[in-house]
């Protein structure tokens, strides 16, 4: 498996960010990051002592007696750092930095008189919303769609966000949209953040179509990990509103302001922006809170060995061939999805005579009808 290389600074920052979330288990995070508890606490102490893992702004975090001129300068500084942010986000960020925030209308007036307001861009209307009750019950995963870099290469951003908190657990600069690429990028994310209960995708490649009986190797791999893959209803983009909104922010705040020439350069830009998005950028969909304030790592760790389904010794178990998706039963070959090649499946009787279900663990993946002619 190809792992994307991360610098020590990236690893330290990611660890400290996750360890600082409410309810985080520092010991579990140390195991996931492959460090000792002593090293983990050293990183946390250093960050708490003011030794950042990344370059920080030298502006004071709190200025209770800031003058009008100082306030205007602070507004413009945030706007210049984040040109796509509007007045409400800037006002909330001032409050997070310890300054009594002005009204959003005041921030807008400051931006207007300093020529920071450009022509309004058209955009998609707000899409319908639904939200899981807690973090990690559902992640949303999607490709933004390919974007051409200045070098002529194509970048396919893979985005993974937590449905409840809007926390971006993954943002990867991929060269293609193949299943192996997704799995190689997804596994380190699952090792760091733990396993969600389900992942929500659209109906394109490499997720599969969601049609009954349609399986992919990626879906089988997730099923072994205890992660359900849920497909969106076709032609209902409102169900993927969080993905669509995240993609628009990614375009407006990264691609529109950076001339990216390589996948490595794009990944560095993604990593910087993901940190801002998760920990600094107020989010309108969650009452202008930052996503990190609502997220915590899942307690379900990535297993040391990929689990395999367990079957009772009394069950009829067949191994699918390595070249075609068939199992042999009652003297005949029966079709099963090709995604289960080389896997072991159980054949169990259903309620009607002559009908059998083909199961991968507890999940039915095919049906056998002995009443049909050869």
Image (cartoon, grey):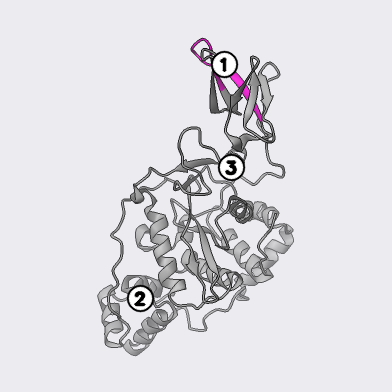
Q: Residues within 10 Å of mark 2 (few under 14, many from 20)?
A: some
Q: Is residue 65 visible?
A: no
Q: Is residue 199 left or right of residue 308?
A: left
Asked whether disc 2 touches disc 1, contact meaning CB atoms under 8 Å apart, the reply is no
Q: Which mark is residue 100?
A: 2
| Residue at 65% from the left image edge and 71% from the top image edge | 9
Q: Nearer the viewer, mark 2 or mark 3?
A: 3
Q: Name the foreground residue: 342 vs 313.
A: 342
Q: Which mark is residue 30?
A: none
Question: Cα distance, mark 1 to mark 3?
Answer: 35 Å
| Residue at 62% from the left image edge and 32% from the top image edge | 325
> Which contiguous range is marked in magenta?
344-357
The main secondary structure of the magenta stretch is strand
- The mark nearer the N terminus, 2 or 3, is 2
**Residue 130 drawn at (x, y percent):** 36, 47
Q: Name the foreground residue: 117 vs 360.
A: 360
Q: Name the foreground residue: 67 vs 184.
A: 184
- The mark nearer the N terminus, 1 or 3, is 3
What residue is pinned by disc 1? Answer: 374
What residue is pinned by disc 3? Answer: 222
On screen, 84 above or below 247? below
Which image quarter is the C terminus in? Answer: top right
Q: Is residue 10 left or right of residue 165?
A: right
Q: Residues within 10 Å of mark 3 (few under 14, many from 20)?
A: some
- The mark nearer the N terminus, 2 or 1, is 2
**Residue 182 drawn at (x, y percent):** 58, 53
The magenta stretch spans residue 349: yes
On screen, 239 above or below 348? below
**Residue 312 drawn at (x, y percent):** 68, 20
């Amino acid at each position: 498996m190809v792992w994307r290389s991360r610098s020590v600074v990236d690893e330290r920052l990611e660890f400290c960010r996750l360890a600082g979330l409410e309810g985080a288990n520092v010991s579990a995070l140390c195991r996931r990051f492959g460090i000792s508890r002593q090293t983990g606490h050293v990183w946390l102490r250093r960050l708490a002592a003011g030794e950042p893992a990344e370059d920080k702004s030298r502006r004071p975090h709190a200025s209770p007696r800031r003058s009008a001129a100082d306030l205007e300068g602070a507004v413009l500084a945030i706007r210049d750092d984040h040109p796509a942010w509007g007045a409400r986000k800037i006002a909330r960020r001032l409050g997070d930095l310890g300054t009594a925030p002005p009204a959003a209308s005041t921030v807008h007036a400051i931006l207007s008189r300093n020529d920071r307001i450009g022509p309004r861009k058209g955009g998609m209307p707000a899409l319908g919303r639904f939200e899981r009750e807690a973090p990690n019950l559902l992640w949303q995963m999607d490709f933004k769609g390919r974007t051409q870099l200045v070098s002529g290469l194509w970048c396919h951003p893979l985005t993974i966000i937590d449905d409840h908190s809007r926390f971006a657990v993954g943002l990867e600069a991929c060269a293609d949209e193949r299943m192996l690429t997704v799995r190689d990028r997804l596994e380190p994310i699952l090792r760091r953040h733990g396993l969600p209960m389900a992942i929500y995708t659209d109906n394109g490649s490499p997720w599969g179509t969601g049609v009954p009986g349609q399986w992919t190797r990626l879906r089988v791999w997730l099923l072994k990990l205890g992660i359900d893959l849920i497909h969106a209803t076709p032609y209902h983009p409102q169900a993927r509103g969080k993905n669509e909104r995240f993609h628009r922010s990614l375009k407006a705040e990264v691609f529109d302001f950076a001339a990216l020439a390589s996948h490595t350069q794009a990944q560095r830009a993604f990593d910087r922006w993901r940190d801002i998005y998760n920990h600094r950028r107020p989010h309108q969909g969650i009452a202008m809170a930052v996503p990190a304030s609502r997220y915590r790592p899942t307690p379900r760790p990535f297993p040391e060995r990929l689990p395999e389904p367990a079957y009772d010794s009394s069950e009829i178990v067949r191994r699918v061939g390595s070249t075609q998706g068939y199992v042999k039963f009652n003297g005949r070959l029966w079709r099963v999805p090709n995604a289960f090649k080389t896997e072991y499946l159980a054949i169990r009787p259903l309620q009607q005579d002559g009908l059998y279900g083909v199961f991968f663990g507890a999940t039915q993946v095919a049906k056998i009808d002995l009443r049909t002619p050869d």
